[in-house]
Image: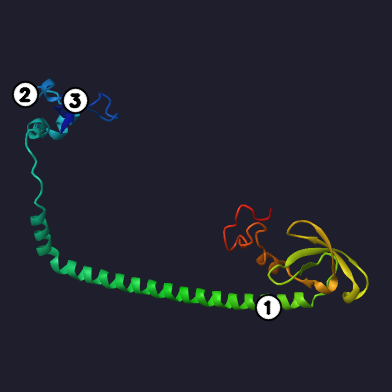
Amino acid sequence: LPGVIPGPPKRQGLWVSFEPSDPTLPPEMALIDRDHLVTVPDPPPGAQLTPWEARHGSRGLALLDSADATLALPDEASLESQLAIKYGGQEEEDDEASSEGSVDLSGGEDEDEDEEEEEEGEGQAEAAAEGGGASSSGAAASASQPIAEGSLVQFGPKGKRRHARVEALGGEGLEGGSASLLVLEDGSKQEVPVAQLSPISEQALELAARCSACGKAEPADRLMLCDNFAR
């Protein structure tokens, strides 16, 4: 078989097969320059032949001559027309069957996706409804929950509310008693009348968190917090 030997300069070569004396070993292939090869005459009658010569005879020796021949590219248009004449009807039926199958499959997939989206939307709506009910019930429960040591509370006017944890209760009753608070925003301690405190749940406290520096940053699950958050 012809081949190209990389240069510079590039040279034409031929792939030559060398058969080892041991028939169990595979032949060795080498690309040799055409100028370094010579043709040998046919062996005389009765001469000992190599296994390759015995298998291929004079056809193997003619491979060198075939290397000079230029192989023509197949005429694809002619081949396609011949295939169309031979298998035209069958190919059209196969194409129609495959196209129908693909339409059915794609249609089924679209319907499955639509059904999944509808089910997902319904599930999210139900979860939102359940979450809303849970939050409202949680708020009602926290509002009715009595204030005790360790409770989370809020105090102050609307818009400037502060949040704290009750460390100790003093006095008797909600009207005249006071509470020692640990303010969560700055870590300070204050004494505040119990009547001015309202309980708050941990979830509501997280949603009400604001940056003490800018006063605008919401919790991390809503917005990217500023650098001053929680300082």
Give the alpha-carbon distance from disc 3 to disc 1, as whole Å: 84 Å
Q: Is residue 142 above or below residue 70?
A: below
Looking at the image, which residue is at 26% across and 69% down? 98
- Look at mark 1 in the image and give the residue it sits on: 136
**Mark 1 neighbour density, 10 Å: few (under 14) some (14–19) many (20 or more):** few
In the picture of the structure, the residue carrying the numbered disc 3 is 7
Kindly identify which residue carries mark 2: 41
Circles 2 and 1 in contact, beta carbons < 8 Å: no
For label 3, the SS is loop
Say how the picture is coloured: rainbow
Task: Tell me which label, 2 or 1, sits earlier in the chain.
Answer: 2
Determine the residue positioned at 90% across, 71% down.
177
Q: Residue at x 63, y 75 (%)?
A: 131
Q: Quadrant of the N terminus?
A: top left
Report helix, strand or loop for mark 1: helix
Viewer-nearest residue: 70 or 57: 70
Ranked by sequence position, the earlier of labels 2 and 3 is 3
Q: Secondary structure at mark 2?
A: loop
Q: Amino acid at mark 3?
A: Gly
